[in-house]
Image: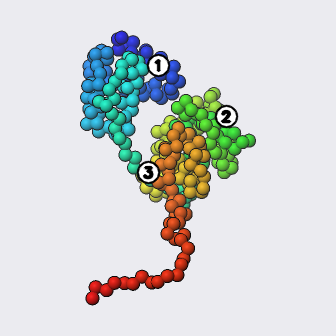
Amino acid sequence: MTNEEVYVRAYEEIKLRGLSPHTVEEYLGKLTLFLRYFDNRPIETMGENEIREFLLYQLDSGKSSGTVNIYNSALRFIFGAVLGRNLNYQLIPRRRQYRPLPSIMTKSEIVLFFSTIDNLRDKAIFETVYGAGLRISEVARLRVQDINSEQMRIFVSHGGKERYTLLSQRNLELLREYWKHYRPSHPDGYLFYSRGRKNNIMTTRAIQDAFHRHCKNANLPNTFTVHTLRHCFATHLLESGAEVCCIKELLGHTFIQTTSFYLHLSNTNQLVQSPLDTLPKKRGRKSKVKSNA
């Protein structure tokens, strides 16, 4: 099988599995970089040793563990599903990832952030991200028909998976005000668009830039990102008593372990009492203090 035929077969295998367009782009892009590293040698002549060398090169180049694991997954798929090879995974292990705790905005900081936004479109975007727990790519591709005001929920499609999340009354009123002033008319129904270009939806970069601009105006730390609002959505729901399983569905997580990460961010420990403090008090002899004299 030639390298060109591998590309065609890889696309077919990804399509058969119903993987997202983003996955197609990621896997085929990683395949291109792998072949380029070895001067486009026939991929059928390569195996675990070449994959190891390539992954080590990526680490030496400063790539993060998460990025290197994506390279690893892509190449495992190409060699396994496309070429039908049984690789020795002991030789190409996935790299252990350390996930640091992200910065979280307090509710007072969120109020301050929203109060400094003087642009109706930007305010509608960021209140929707926080109010519904959306990813930046999800709010960028939010459509008018995704807003269900009757059932007070928002339809979200991401990575080939669909879910419903919350639509708050405040969010609905703001979106209606935005609709009234901007009258979005994209042929596919997309809600947010670039200034003066109604047929061009907002890019994630433009949304991120707007977020940092408003954070700066509010004198908030530059460590906050748009995704911080999604973290805050989950953390504040957890602190208000929402079940982890419910939050998992709203966020669109596949595994409950991913959602359980927010247990480390919430202040629910303040509501938990040590069992030592719950023991019934019983009178007894006072403990004597031993003297060294």
Q: Nearer the viewer, mark 1 or mark 3?
A: 1
Give the residue type that dot 2 points to. Gln
Q: Which residue has dot 1 on it?
A: 13
Camera-side residue: 42 or 132? Answer: 42
Disc count in the image?
3
Identify whether 216 is placed above or below 147: below
Residue 101 horizontal/vertical position (percent):
42, 51
Local crowd size for mark 2, using a 10 Å CA cut-off: few (<14), some (14–19), many (≥20): few
Give, as a three-letter code, the residue at label 3: Pro
The earlier-in-sequence mark between 1 and 2 is: 1
Secondary structure found at label 3: loop
Residue 56 vs residue 187, the one in the foreground: 56
- The kind of secondary structure element at disc 1 is helix
Q: Badges 1 and 3: C-beta atoms under 8 Å apart?
A: no
Q: Residues within 10 Å of mark 3 (few under 14, many from 20)?
A: some
* C-alpha separation, residue under disc 3 versus residue under disc 2: 33 Å
